[in-house]
Image (cartoon, rainbow, N blue to C red):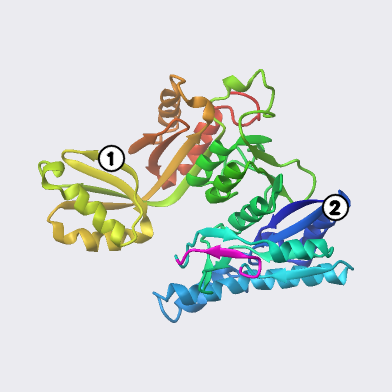
Amino acid sequence: MKTCVQKFGGSSLISVKQRKQVVDRITRTINDGYQPVVVVSAMGRAKDPYATDTLIELVKEINSDPCLRNMDMLLSCGEIISAVVLAETLNQLGYTAVALTGWQSGIITDENFGNARILSVNTDLITKLLEEGKIPIVTGFQGCTLSGEVTTLGRGGSDTTAVALGAALSCDTVEIYTDVDGVKTADPRLIPDAPTISSITYQEIMELAHLGTRVIHPRAVEIAMEAGIELKILGLDQLSCGTIIRKGLSGRIDPKQISDRVVTGIAQITGCAHVKISGVEDFNKSHLTLIIFDILATKGVSVDLIYLSPKLIAFIIDDKMSALVREVLADLGLNITVDLGYAKVSVVGAGMHGVPGVMARVVRSLDQANVPIYQTTDSHANISCLIKEKKLAAAVRALFDEFELSKEGVN
């Protein structure tokens, strides 16, 4: 029998009704002739008893700057609870399921607590359980170091666990179940009528993921691309075919129309602060550019949407880092402004590479929607604009309409 890895997010496990849907998905896979390996996230969302954010707040009420090593031990508990609850749900129905931690599943990571990367996967125990006809229920988001320290893989790490196991087990497909029925052309919270994309390339979904779409973690996509694994993003209701992620454009819509599809989807990142630094005649001669970014790096500040010129440095940061940035750069004797309330909105599509006029369409549509642009950046597969967060809904709707993303056809 072939093996299929199925990952279920925390919102899919929070209630008895939803766990029944999860069980239905697992048992249908068995009836289709596959042996499932199931990966789970912590149950629920922030404020729910066992959710990751709830566990974080439990400690931060005591210590605002807790030890990352200790936090990883705590945060691993959420997925363990999910794995045991789901395993016992299956056992009660007559199946034999075994809950496994990340380290019991053979996931070895580096020592970067809070955001560890997988170094290797030893599937001996999982393979043994499969040979015995049992269903492994694996905790996502976690592993351990070579010295036995518990680690977590960062936000979205359960996706990475699932795909890493899929690669180690030589699976053809990994299924990721979420509370939406696939990847949408735009955020359904802003565009309720945004359709589901039936098929998308690795490159496009990685761009969307890096630029704010939270359906799947970009590292999971990287591993899938390296291993040649097809990913399926699915809802629990079994009514939708979801989104297939794979190499190339094969299978997306009508092959005769693919070349006309410029933009595949829209992504956004909110909670941004716009930093502008001036006050020196020539940054390059004074080496202040290097000094500034070195200081920010050592303080763990991630910068994005970077603009450099002889007289101005500008970039965006997470607005939660604003006070820290002001503090650590204060002694440089520069004019520093940190403005809050910004968002980064991006259009993504492999088809835009080399196509003239895409930027013009972006600028025109935002201008017509009365959305000022404060900064831009682009690559071969995306164009990103910095805008005021209060204008985000209008911007997404304008771009959605401009590139005809209300249909899964061409633009």
Q: Residues within 10 Å of mark 1 (few under 14, many from 20)?
A: some
Residue at screen point 85% across, 52% down: 28
Q: Is residue 168 magenta?
A: no
What amino acid type is highlighted by mark number 1? Tyr
Of the two numbered discs 1 and 2 on the same chain, state the one appearing first in sequence: 2
Q: Which residue is under mark 2?
A: 28
Q: Please indicate, yes or no, whether residue 14 appears anywhere in the rendered image.
A: no
Q: Which residue is under mark 1?
A: 307
What amino acid type is highlighted by mark number 2? Arg
Residue 231: % across, % down:
66, 44
Residue 394: % across, % down:
48, 38
Residue at screen point 57% across, 66% down: 143
Q: Which residues are magenta?
A: 103-111
Q: Quadrant of the C terminus?
A: top right
Residue 62: % across, % down:
44, 82
* Left or right for 3, reference 248: right
Q: Give the alpha-carbon distance from disc 1 to disc 2, as whole Å.
A: 52 Å
* Left or right for 355, reference 408: left
- Dot 2 falls on a residue whose secondary structure is helix
